[in-house]
Image (spheres, helix red, strand yellow):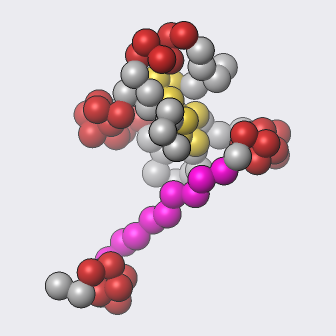
Amino acid sequence: EGGFTAWQGSGRETDQVHRISARQFEEKMEESPMPVFDVRRKNEYDSQHLTDALNIPLHLISQQLEQFPRERAFAIHCAGG
């Protein structure tokens, strides 16, 4: 009850996801490289992907959460934005 505002008001943990352009991604990677996770289907990843990106298809994320760093930024690449 109370939605997201109530959740925040109770002191529970929250996080944010920021959408950036390809240019912004390039700039961030030049400043401070970070892990990249490609959550597209394997066939999409196999056809073309960013160098060093780790493919974890979206439907498998909950089984691979230990792969995602908890204390540092990372990028997620997906087909739908």
Is residue 16 located in the magenta-colored stretch of the structure? Answer: yes
Locate the N terminus by quadrant: bottom left
Camera-side residue of 66 and 38 = 38
Q: Main secondary structure of the magenta part?
A: loop
Residue 39 is situated, as x and y percent measured from the top left of the image, at 44, 31
Residue drawn at the location 54% of the way across and 35% of the way down: 77
Q: Would you say 61 lies left or right of 53 here?
A: left
Residue drawn at the location 48% of the way across and 39% of the way down: 80
Camera-side residue of 29 and 18 = 18
Q: In this picture, is 76 found above or below 70? A: above
Q: Would you say 75 lies left or right of 22 here?
A: left
Is residue 26 located in the magenta-colored stretch of the structure? Answer: no
Residue drawn at the location 65% of the way across and 40% of the way down: 34
Most extreme residue toward the left, as rendered?
Answer: 1
What residue range appears in magenta?
11-20
Q: Does the image show residue 52?
A: no
Q: Would you say 32 lies left or right of 54 here?
A: right
Task: Determine which quarter of the picture holds residue 57.
Answer: top left
Residue 56 is situated, as x and y percent measured from the top left of the image, at 40, 27
Q: In this picture, is 19 found above or below 65? A: below
Residue drawn at the location 57% of the way across and 25% of the way down: 53
Residue 13 is situated, as x and y percent measured from the top left of the image, at 36, 72
Q: Would you say 54 lies left or right of 21 here?
A: left
